[in-house]
Image (cartoon, grey):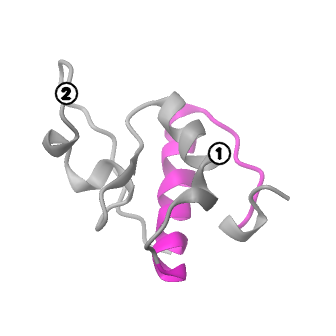
Amino acid sequence: MQTTWTPNTEHGSIHNRAELPESVFAFPMQRKEPLTDANHVRDALARFDQVEGVTDADRDLAFANIKKAAAYYGIDVHEGSWRDLGH
């Protein structure tokens, strides 16, 4: 799956989610689950099944984005699919 996630390399703090580019979100079209650091990646994995109003295709993209961000931040993701989360 082609990912859309890229790290946010701007310096300084961004205090408003609206200032973040779509490319830092697990669900870029819905701007849900920002993946701006290791803690946000862990949170996105933990709350993945709580995201509402998204399709399975959206979830496929989001999981691929999370895996890419996790690799960037040095987080191990053992699940091969979002369907494996929580099992």
Q: Residue at x 16, y 45 (%)?
A: 18
Task: Say which quadrant the C terminus sits in.
Answer: bottom right
The crowd level at tag 2 (other Cα within 10 Å; few <14, some 14-19, many 20+) is few
Q: Looking at numbered disc 1 in the image, what kind of residue is underneath it?
A: Ala
Q: Position of residue 9 (x, y in %)?
A: 24, 32
Numbered disc 2: secondary structure: loop
Q: Looking at numbered disc 2 in the image, what kind of residue is underneath it?
A: Ile
- Position of residue 51 in the picture relative to residue 28 (left or right): right
- Position of residue 70 in the picture relative to residue 9 (left or right): right
The image quadrant that residue 75 belongs to is: top right
- Position of residue 23 in the picture relative to residue 82 (left or right): left
Q: Which residue extends farthest top?
A: 12
Whether 66 is drawn above or below 42: the answer is: below
Numbered disc 1: secondary structure: helix
Tell me which numbered mark, 1 or 2, is placed earlier along the sequence. Answer: 2
Q: What residue span does the magenta drawing correspond to?
A: 55-81
Q: Position of residue 44 (x, y in %)?
A: 54, 46
Whether 20 is drawn above or below 61: the answer is: above
> What secondary structure is the stretch in magenta mostly built from?
helix
Q: Which residue is mark 2?
A: 14
Q: Residue at x 73, y 64 (%)?
A: 80
Q: Which residue extends farthest right?
A: 87
Taking the magenta stretch, the answer to whether it contains residue 75 is yes
Q: Which residue is mark 1?
A: 46
Q: Which of the two residues, 13 or 46, is positioned nearer the viewer here?
A: 46
